[in-house]
Image: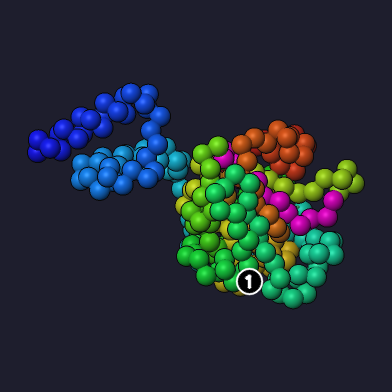
Amino acid sequence: MPSQDNSRRRFLRRALAAGGALVLSGCDQLSQSAWFTKLLGSAEKLTFATQRLLLPRKAMAQEFTEADLSPFFRSNGTSNPDNPGYQAMAAHQFADYRLQVGGLVAQPRAYSLDELRALPSRTQITRHDCVEGWSAIGKWKGVPLSRVLEQVQPQPSARYVVFYCADPMDARGTRYYESIDMEDAWHAQTLLAYELNDAPLPIKNGAPIRVRVERQLGYKMAKYIMQIQLVERLDDIAGGQGGYWEDRGYEWYAGI
Ligand SMILES: Nc1nc2c(c(=O)[nH]1)N[C@H]1C(S)=C(S)[C@@H](COP(=O)(O)O)O[C@H]1N2
Ligand SMILES: [Mo]
């Protein structure tokens, strides 16, 4: 329609004059015009399609069946954090637990265990491989980390998700932490797990929350997660290598 074409041309001229630095908020007339709404809509679709292409590394880790479950899922590393704060929470079945999620996000949040359980869940049977030479197949239930990310809304500058754990400090004054990149963070099988083999996650396996990052080795799967931080860089955290074991020489990307 001629009138729409006119307003469109005027808009584009103004847009060009502004050098692309468009301030769109408060442009009521613009947002009511049909062609402009359509333009915004298609831009949004394009962004979404681009993200779907770029964000998840598509490959899924192998999943198994109930028949494959290991009779016993052993514990490794810390098996019961010798930390008064943690022990107090454990004594009350983690009713006072709050998972802090912050850093480079638009909406920092703290989640109770009930709130995490109320979010949509995923269940998966996968094999855990520890560099110390043992593997076990377990059934994990938890909230996909992607669901939490959708709520807290990472800022564009966020490149890594860092998990801080309740382990006591070691002799060197450092404690367990881990990190993954945004591709693994959005991956469908990356869970904040609260159940193992149809029972609440045992303390020895990371209660109340541990992460599952199924295409990587066991040491990436931080247990006893108290805090999650989105960050742009890892080199200014602890030993600077992105994790407790990484700071001691292990690979940061521990792909299987
Ligand atoms: N907080 C914390 N997370 C941790 C560890 C640890 O010592 N502390 N050990 C890691 C290692 S090396 C492995 S193999 C797995 C062991 O998980 P499991 O105890 O459920 O078998 O947890 C990983 N996550
Ligand atoms: Mo491990």
> Is residue 165 shown in magenta?
yes
Tally of marks:
1
Residue 200: image quadrant is bottom right
* Position above or below: 208 against 233: below
Question: Which residue sits at x=54%, y=49%?
Answer: 106
Residue on which disc 1 sits: 200
- Viewer-nearest residue: 166 or 152: 152
Across and down, in percent, residue 243 comes to 71, 42
Question: Which residue sits at x=49%, y=48%?
Answer: 187
Location of the C terminus (image quadrant): top right
Looking at the image, what colour scheme do you see? rainbow
> Is residue 100 shown in magenta?
no
Lateral position of residue 213 relative to residue 240, left or right: left
Across and down, in percent, residue 225 comes to 68, 57
* Position above or below: 108 against 139: above
Question: Which residue sits at x=85%, y=65%?
Answer: 84
Question: Which residue sits at x=57%, y=40%?
Answer: 158
Is label 1's Cβ within 8 Å of ligand 1?
Answer: no
Q: Is residue 211 visible?
A: no
Q: Residues within 10 Å of mark 1 (few under 14, many from 20)?
A: some
Q: In this picture, which residue range is highlighted in magenta?
A: 158-169
* Position above or below: 100 against 89: above
Q: Is residue 179 visible?
A: yes
The amino acid type found where label 1 is placed reads Pro
